[in-house]
Image: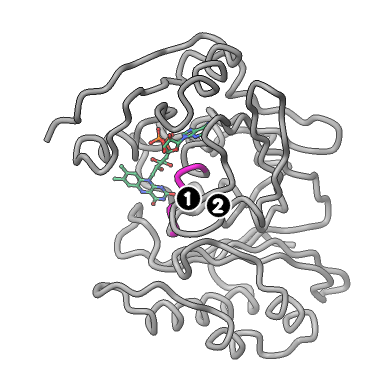
Amino acid sequence: MTPARFAYLRPDTLGEALAVLAREGEGATPLAGGQSLMPMMAMRMARPALLLDLNRVAGLDGIAVVEGALHIGAMARHATVLAHPLVAAHAPLLPLALREVAHPAIRNRGTLGGSLCLADPAAELPACMLALDATLVLANRAGERGVAAVDFFQGLYATARRADELLVRVEIPLSPGWSPWFAETARRHGDYALAGLAMMCRREAGRITALRIAFLGVEAAPRRLPEVEAAILDSADAAALLPRLLSPLHAEEAPAAWRLHLAQVLLRRAMIGEGRHAAA
Ligand SMILES: Cc1cc2nc3c(=O)[nH]c(=O)nc-3n(C[C@H](O)[C@H](O)[C@H](O)COP(=O)(O)OP(=O)(O)OC[C@H]3O[C@@H](n4cnc5c(N)ncnc54)[C@H](O)[C@@H]3O)c2cc1C
């Protein structure tokens, strides 16, 4: 299929892009890597009146440490983030997760900001943002505002982004002494996950003393589960709490009961340190 007719703008600066959004609001749809938006347009599931191409906007793809946080620009490509030494040093959860995202061709074009703004429930990066305690920075013509990852993802493909805003970067607090753990189950490597778990934890003398976990592919949006985190800190069987706490998505090919089971398996594996992980 071919997309419906649309107008197209490709600004060079953030100011120009934000001026377009201020004028057009929901009539304008940002285009990042196009790896989700273009297929949706081709299938006419998305019909933007105006496509606002961010690919020439300068300054949106930087990666740097700034005042105790790792800043990653919204237009940083998955492949760049995956290979970046600052990310490896300060947010090693991201390379663990990004290896599971699609295939090299898609990772060469797909962007961090595109994945977060799309908010696909099965995407790896939104759950990682919760585990990393990241802040998502949104800009409009009036300025910037930071939204904690726990507040950004609001449901199935729904976020806190307003129509006149662009996601410009994420800020990840540096967390020395914390280690990442990531695992997912997918039908084939590179497919969207049926269920996955992103976790950051701090261990002292072999014991977990603090942690943040978020599932992907299980519920409509990733969220923290304070009761589960507290149970882990108490060395209780946290996985036994999941049937009461989770509301898994249901689909014929991946029923809710199955996703719940996978979530329990992933959590138990995380607790015994199996799977892909970086050693504490
Ligand atoms: C075959 C295939 C397999 C895939 N498998 C996976 C997978 O396993 N896991 C996974 O996580 N992803 C997967 N993806 C998605 C891909 O990894 C990209 O992350 C995703 O397409 C979004 O990034 P993008 O840069 O392409 O965004 P686009 O497609 O350009 O945009 C996505 C949405 O975000 C909005 N947007 C983009 N940037 C901004 C911004 N800065 N501010 C505000 N709004 C913005 C757009 O308007 C649009 O609504 C797959 C894609 C394909 C085609």
Q: Quadrant of residue 203?
A: bottom right
Q: Nearer the viewer, residue 44 or 83?
A: 44
Q: Which quarter is ligand 1 in?
A: top left
| Percent of width and height locating residue 158 | 49, 52
Q: Residue furthest top?
A: 12
Q: Residue at x 55, y 62 (%)?
A: 222
Relative placement, left or right, of 78 versus 63 is left
Within 10 Å of the Cα at label 2, are there few (<14), some (14-19), or many (20+) other Cα atoms? many
Residue range (magenta)? 117-121
Q: Is residue 52 left or right of residue 1?
A: right
Q: Which residue is mark 1?
A: 119
Up-down: is 87 above or below 59? below
Q: Residue 116 location in percent, x, y?
A: 52, 44
Please tell me whether mark 1 or mark 2 is closer to you in this view.
Answer: 1
| SS for callout 2 | helix
- Residue found at the very far left of the displayed protein: 1
User: In the rendered image, which quarter is residue 39 located in?
Assistant: top left
Magenta residue check for 217: no
- Under mark 2, the amino acid is Pro
Residue occupying the point 50% across, 54% down: 124
Tell me if label 1 and label 2 are in contact, CB under 8 Å. Answer: yes
User: Relative to residue 162, is residue 55 depicted above or below?
Assistant: above
Report x, y in % for residue 87. 66, 39
Q: Quadrant of residue 104?
A: top left
Return the residue nearer the eye: 13 or 55: 13
Left or right of 42 on screen, residue 189: right
Residue under label 2: 126
